[in-house]
Amino acid sequence: MSFHKIAHYLHIDTFLLCTMTLLFLMGLFILYSAGNQSFILIEKQIMHILLAGFIMLLVAQVPPIVWQRWAPWIYGLSLAFLVAVLLMGHIGKGAQRWLSISGFRFQPAEFMKFAIPLLLAWYYNKIHLPLSFKSILISAAIIMVPVLLTAKQPDLGTAILLFAAGSAVLFFAGLSVRIMAGITLLLTTGMPLLWYVMHDYQRQRVLTFLNPERDPLGAGYHIIQSKIAIGSGGLFGKGWLTGTQSHLHFLPEHTTDFIFAVCSEEFGFMGNILLITLFMVIVMRGLYITVHAQDTFTRLLAGSITVTFFLSFFINIGMVTGILPVVGLPLPFISYGGSSLVTSLASFGMLMSIRTHRKLITT
Amino acid sequence: MRKAHTPFKDITHEVELTEHRSWAAFIVMLFLVLLLLCRLAYLQIYKNQVYTTLSTHNWLDLVPLEPIRGLIFDRNGILLADNTPVFSLDVIPDKAKNLNKMLAEVGKIIPLSAADLTLFQKQLKQHRRFDEIPLRLRLTDLEVARFAENQYRFPGFLIKARLIRHYPFSNSFSHVLGYIGQINNEELNSIDTANYSASRYIGKLGIEKYYEEDLHGKVGYQEVEIDANGEPIRVLKQIKPFPGKNLYLSVDSQLQLAAEKALDGHRGAIVAIEPQTGQILALVSMPHYDPNLFVLGLSSADFQHLQQHPDHPLYNRAIRGLYPLASTIKPYLALEGLDKDIISSEDTIYDPGWFMLKNSEHVFRDTKVHGTVDLTKAIITSCDVYFYELASKMGIKRIDNVLQQFGFGKLSGIEMDEEVAGVVSSPEWKRRVKKAPWYEGDTIISGIGQGYMQATPLQLAVAVSTLANRGKRVAPSLLFAQQELGKAFEQQSPILMDTITLNDEENWDTIIHAMQKVIDAPDGTAHRFGPHPGYTIAGKTGTAQVHSKKQDEEGLEDQKKLPEQLRDHSLFIAFAPAEQPKIALAIIVENGSTAAVPLAKQILDFYLNKKEPSHVIP
């Protein structure tokens, strides 16, 4: 049996899988260096990848119509978890994000990354496009309730991604440009108001983002050291395993949120171009799948997944390079960690499901 | 019943919409990615230099390595200054938490005196937070062991082995060697800070200061990789420090100790020079002090004690003490008078015990009535009236001239910055400094070395050394030789200056013979030197008045009845053997009346009659 046939049988999108594998390989190389050549870290990350890959495979087997049917239930359950985490969640790194059920710890906010697009796509599939004012209001509620709950944990990064995932559905559903401009305007003017509801550490981050040299050894340290790592990498980098910023522990969080700086330091501008190109190839494939999806539900879902993926790496690189505030988001596929990997691969499972469960119709 | 209006889904429209929106999303995403790439290009290409520098600053630490200070020996290779390893307890304030509490705790293990603590607090203010500051120096082995056991309780405290300057003879060479001490702010401005980046000490005085550049050596460097906590990971590159030069001083430490022993109990100075070479054989100033105290850091109380001591042990009398030349001036004036035919050796004068100028009421007294005296007798008995007359005939210009020829009134050039020049008084000098006109009387008393002129013991020794050399002038020098690591022993050659030439070279011997009789003749002022020392000796005594006698007082008074600080200073200049001088000597005993002569005998006996140079143990 040929590889193509196996792939087809397992509902795998070969193109996506190959690109992702390349990214994973690159990621392991970077992680090996960032983790000071610890094989334990690599083994663990490989386990994460295998687990997440298995989940992706599982998700891919489920036809989109099933996801569509379950969408309200998934959303409802996720919302229930999100409320539960506020009431009795674990506290880690100053935020209440984790829920533990019979020893298995997970972040309910991660589920929302699918739940919101699923429900919105389900909803728009039912009603007629273009969107009416009433449907926009309902959509806003579907998005904002989990977003606010997540922001309250507090987990600003995920909240932003949730907002983006929901908005992406709206965008693909044809939300008028005027309304989008209006919302953008509202958000920018509302920023100063946001200041009053922010946690102290979030305010610090914003202040530090605006001027990292304000506190070079405290809050600004991360971003200053990160910029040094990136800038000193130059065009071709210092070479694999020779980055001084990460190996001598100047760069904080160098295996997780700031791993992009390690890549920049050791592989330089060229390495970054390769990495970003791979990301963009995945994005383009996602858009391809979106355009070729067969119904409104899958089109909206695929579009949202793609845009969310784009934003997750864009925001991460943006914050590591200092053009966006530090919000605490990992670099997808590269950063060490299982939780976010499972979610993002599950979403790619959905993309594959959308791609491979098309009915054969000739147009 | 109306069927609910369910409009048809416009499939084509929705596909088109998705396609449009996908393109729009793609374009926006491309734009954003471009933005990222621009940012990356800015950081990695445009600003690469800046960030590379910052990165290097982050992980590369340049640790300076202190060079070993050159050793100082005497001319026979006896060690006068070395570096001994000591263990000290150091503190890095930045790493110590709750410093004051820790200091109290450490005090229970290693005794800390109040002086230690004050000095530490003082240094704490002067150093950076991450510098190592010594808390206590010279730990005993037991203390080191006791602290090592408890090390874990005191983060930021560490035992450090370092080399510390040590002067094995302690007091004996203090006024020659000087000492080193911690570099102060003023010195920081004048030194090459790069070369001193690892050094804490610098020469403060004496030889240690004068030859600082040679003794210090050249700093070395270590390039060390450090992590974010500033902990060194490994040494990448090392440039070894280059040790300072070893110096061999011209001083003969045995003679120095003998001279010191002779002068012990007095205030005064002794300078001995080898006339042929100008090399200083001994340079003693008493009382003296222990330079080791300054290396370890003196508490301000101890320093004040030294500074305010009535005998001024810190005062280097040999090169800074200013005394009237007194009668030691007489041989030089006599020589000038002879050579310029102002007097002849046969001429006599009558000394009634006093001298008066023609148009003045002022009486210049002599120590006694000498009667008829010629030149030789005038020198032997130190007849004042003879020299009042000579001075009157010579005039102050000539006197100044001869004094300057013999090196008075200017720095001798010895390798010590602290030396003072002394004064050769002239009418111009008096007008300028004293704002008063010059009187004939000023010239008269210059004839017996009183008045405004002042000289250091070193200048007295240099002048008598020139006399011993029959006019050949050699600059005094404390350096015998030096040796740089890996290079040959480099002996210092004498620095010759303009020779004093006489119209008649015989005059040298006339004066020197007279000076020999100062000791040999029964009426010589240095007759108590004693007969037959085993060598020939020429000398001249001097008595510098501290307490000025009134006009109507008797010339002679019993010095022993005076309180000590009012007694005359006793001066003696000498050289021996008279024909082939090996040593020239100047001795000043403050308030010592006539004490200088027997001291000279002790020193000359020791130097000229010694058999083999025996080893001196400090």
Image (spheres, helix red, strand yellow):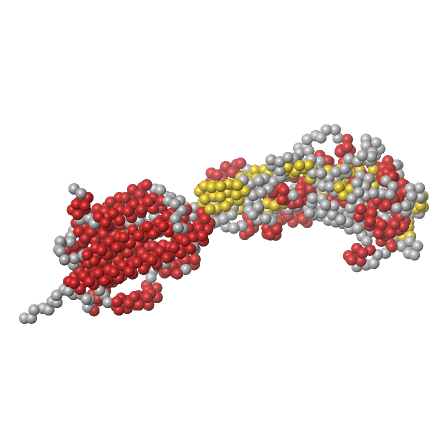
State the residue in front, B295 or B193.
B193
User: Residue B388, can we see it?
Assistant: no
Looking at this rendering, what residue extends furthest in the top direction?
B611
Looking at this rendering, what residue extends furthest in the left direction?
B1
At x 15% / y 62%, what residue is drawn? B11
Position of residue A89 measured from the top left corner of the image (x, y, whole percent): 26, 54
Position of residue B530 measured from the top left corner of the image (x, y, whole percent): 83, 34
At x 22% / y 67%, what residue is drawn? A137
Position of residue B568 measured from the top left corner of the image (x, y, whole percent): 80, 46
User: Residue A356, can we see it?
Assistant: yes
Left or right of A289 in this view: B343: right
Looking at this rendering, what residue extends furthest in the front direction?
A363
- Quadrant into which the N terminus of chain A falls: top left
State the residue in front, B545 or A12.
A12
Left or right of B235 in this view: B192: right
Q: Answer above or below: position of A101 versus B140.
A: below
State the residue in front, A292 or B223.
A292
Looking at this rendering, what residue extends furthest in the bottom direction?
B1
Q: Answer above or below: position of B465 versus A321.
A: above
Question: Quadrant of residue A191 in the image?
Answer: bottom left
Q: Answer above or below: position of A169 versus B534.
A: below
- Quadrant into which the C terminus of chain A falls: bottom left
- The number of discs equals 0
Position of residue B527 measured from the top left corner of the image (x, y, whole percent): 85, 37
At x 40% / y 53%, what residue is drawn? B44
Left or right of A308 in this view: B200: right
Question: Quadrant of residue B499 in the image?
Answer: top right
At x 43% / y 57%, what residue is drawn? A213
